[in-house]
Amino acid sequence: MSDNDRRARHPLRAALAAHAAAEEAAKTAPPPPPAMPAAEPVRSPGSAATPAVPFPAAAPEPEAPLAAAPVADEHEPAIPSKLPIRAPSLSLAEAVETSVIAQVEPPAEAPPVTVAERALEAPTPVATDEEPAAIAEIETEEPATVAADPEMLDAPEERAAEERAAEERPAEERAPEERPAAAAADPVAPPPARRAPLRRTAAPDPRSAGGRALRAALAAYARDDYVDAARQLTKLARAGNAEAQHRLGFLYAQGKGVLGNLGDAIVWYRRAAEQGHVEAQYQLSLAYFFGGHAHFEVGRWYETSAEIDKTTADRNLELMFPNGIGVLQDHAEALRWSIAAAEQGHVEAQARTGTMYARGFGCETDYEAARRWYLLAAEQGDASAEFGLGVLHANGFGVDIDLPAAARWYEKPAAKGYADAQLALGLMCASGAGMERDPERAVLLFRQAADAGNPRARHNLALHLVRGDGVPQNLVMAETYFRQAARQSYTPAMVQLGRMYSLGQGTAQSESEAALWYRAAAEAGDAEAQFMIAALHARGDGVPKRLVDAARWFEKAAEQGHATAQFNIGVFYRDGSGVERDPARAVEWFGRAADQGLAVAQANLGKLYLSGDGVPQDAKAAARLLARAAEAGDPDAETTLGILFLQGHGVDHDPAAAEELFRLAAERGYAPAWFQLGNFYSEDRGSGTNPSEAARCYRGAAEAGHLASQLIVARNHLAGIWGPRDEAAAAAWFRRAAEAGHAGAQFQLATMYCTAAGVPKDLDAAVAWYRRAAEQGERIAQYNLAVMLVRGDGVEPDPEEALNWYRKAAEQGVPEAQIALGDFYATGRGVAVDCDEARRWFDKAAGQGHEGAAARLAALARLQAQPQASAPAPQSGPQRAGSGS
């Protein structure tokens, strides 16, 4: 018994074959057609499907937000620092797709798909809950099958007869698509080219035994008796019949009547291809281009067995399927067989060969070769080849850029319903590239391609609906098209949908829903979406506020070249926000963003060079970077550079240049520049001061929210330096600074409420403002709050809380608080009597020169010498401190 016979009788193989046959028999077979249809070439369906990204119906439960960092607002820095740039809330009308034509690039990666599965896929109508998969870029559609169409299973001699009859008909009797186009009628039309003779293996005479056997096998296939068809085709194939070999390869690829596996399919396709069978050559090319493995009973059996015992599974696989059950991707081999079919005049093989040369699949990129093959296929009306020629002309690949010619080539497949060409032509109409701008036609073309399921067309149609460009504005329909494209994993549509939810345009506003779409696009690798989800995490909008996550996403976007993300992650590394502080990494990221021309990054990098933080200190390098940013109009850079000119640091001393830079930045509304101008006019630089101009500039800065300027304005009003003393104006400015969180202003405002200076006396308000300042560590406010708690001024008396605030103030060195705390311990008020603790605090106050400390120490000594004597009475009450720290 031969090895083949032993393999055929293997019990496991027999069981699998029986199961497959039972499945086939269980299916309801349609009635057989009255006659075998004429064979047609395999048409290329759309690109391989990519699973839609699942989106939860509701936002996840928010996590507990991180605690906010305390406000640090002590002194105005000499050089104002820049906060991280937040995600911009762009209007959807500003989001315009500028790409007109597609680059020739490899298609996006898709999950492994068997060749047979590709052949079985049929176009399905677009549904609202399940959209066709995304096409990454405008490009020639990929054939998605290596198995012949069932209608190819007709007799070769019938197809040849039809072709000969068509060729013999006069040109005027042929259908329009059959007539050769005149080159002179269209300047873009290719020059006449001879079609390579169609070489076929000799078909058996229908009257011969071989011919009758082939027809019998085809009849068995037509009545869905695939087992019998496979049996008869196997006999013919083993006898060397190329057509039978091709048909048998198809059955193995489809898993009909045999144990479906690509290993055996490839063997039979190759035998037919080596005899010159053109369809087998083309199918073999597709098989090697895509690669794949079996998903039928064989594939499931092997995968299940391998999970249990891979070694045994591999041994059984080798025994039963020596040809394997799959095929490895091999672009070079795919190109070889594609050329073989193309040279025989196979139009789809010619178009595919052109695409492979254009993209460098299996060869070096060769646009001239691509153009030659595209022209041959385009001469026969192949839409994908016509589109490919449009791409070459639009991008200048192998030819000069010629947008009008590209448009003419796009027109041909667009008229045939080729979605990618409709999209490309629509983009040209929308932008006016190579033609007069025609937004109405662009919308029509986008709609046609969108109806065919093209995600990029849906995205562009939505953009036009948002802007009302070429179509009445309709935000609701725009949201629908964005959603359809987003569900096809088209990331720009996900980003736009996130923006719509963030802005509440065309849908209810929802930051959490926006975050879901941004995250989906971010995880798909979209840099803008990564930036947006990072910004949401930094602010806590729609997602938990987590600086660690913000830093992670900013860095991912930055690594893709997103300039603003590069700046933001630089800020995070500089400040240690969400990442460990690393000034050197901050320098690196600021440098990358600065190289892209981001002025704020240039300014902040210049500041690091000034301080020598993360980089050797270099004032001249800092000045150069600040000058670049200042030329771009960055007010922070103008202000900082002005300070350098004023100091002669890294540049020549030039007060006039400093004044001009301060004024430029101030005119842009930059508050620190107004503040620096106020300082400039307050100082005598040889020609006297200018108090009125200084006051005007300080007020300008204060009105813009500059805290230091607000305090300066308030104190000058209180002291009457700029005119008559104006306590009410002073109180108003102290209030603005206090409400912004400045502890010193809060203390000053509380004191004014206590003394009715500029405001009505209000001890309740005084306690409230003292408390806010005390909680920020303002020591005199802590002491004054304790005094009011002891006396019950504006608050219920609370000695216990008062003792706590006295202790805090005393620990910060307020001598009055130290005396008061010593009194508490000496008298046992609210605490146990502790003369040692009282002496310790009295000593601290004495060390600071407090007049009452010596008397208390003497009284305490007498008390300890006479234990029976009464304790010394404290003074009439604690003194309220008069000024803040």
Image (cartoon, rainbow, N blue to C red):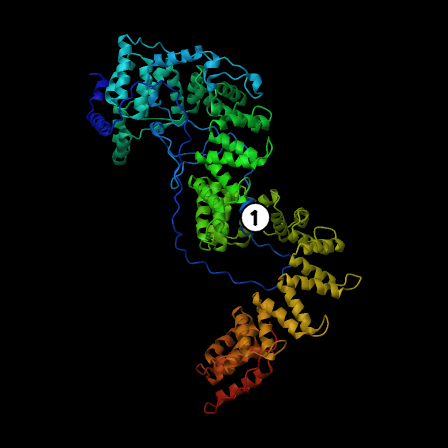
Q: In this view, does 213 lie above or below 128?
A: above
Quarter of the image for residue 731 reads bottom right
What residue appears at the point 26 percent right and 22 percent down from the top-left corner? 223
Q: As drawn, which residue projects farthest toward the bottom?
A: 869
In the foreground, 50 or 70: 50
Q: In which quarter of the image is the N terminus?
A: top left
In the foreground, 539 or 791: 539
In the foreground, 744 or 105: 105
Relative to residue 467, is residue 274 drawn left or right? left
Relative to residue 190, is residue 306 drawn left or right? left
> Label 1 is placed on what type of residue?
Phe
Helix, strand or loop at mark 1: helix
Image location (x, y in percent) of residue 786: 52, 78
Image location (x, y in percent) of residue 38: 36, 18
Q: As drawn, which residue projects farthest toward the right?
A: 687
What residue appears at the point 62 percent right and 44 percent down from the top-left corner? 597
Quarter of the image for residue 718 reads bottom right
Picture mark count: 1
Q: In this view, does 840 lie above or below 687?
A: below
Residue 82 shows in this picture? yes
Q: In which quarter of the image is the C terminus?
A: bottom right
Image location (x, y in percent) of residue 544: 44, 55
Residue 136 shows in this picture? no
Q: Mark 1 points at which residue?
A: 567
Image location (x, y in percent) of residue 370: 51, 22
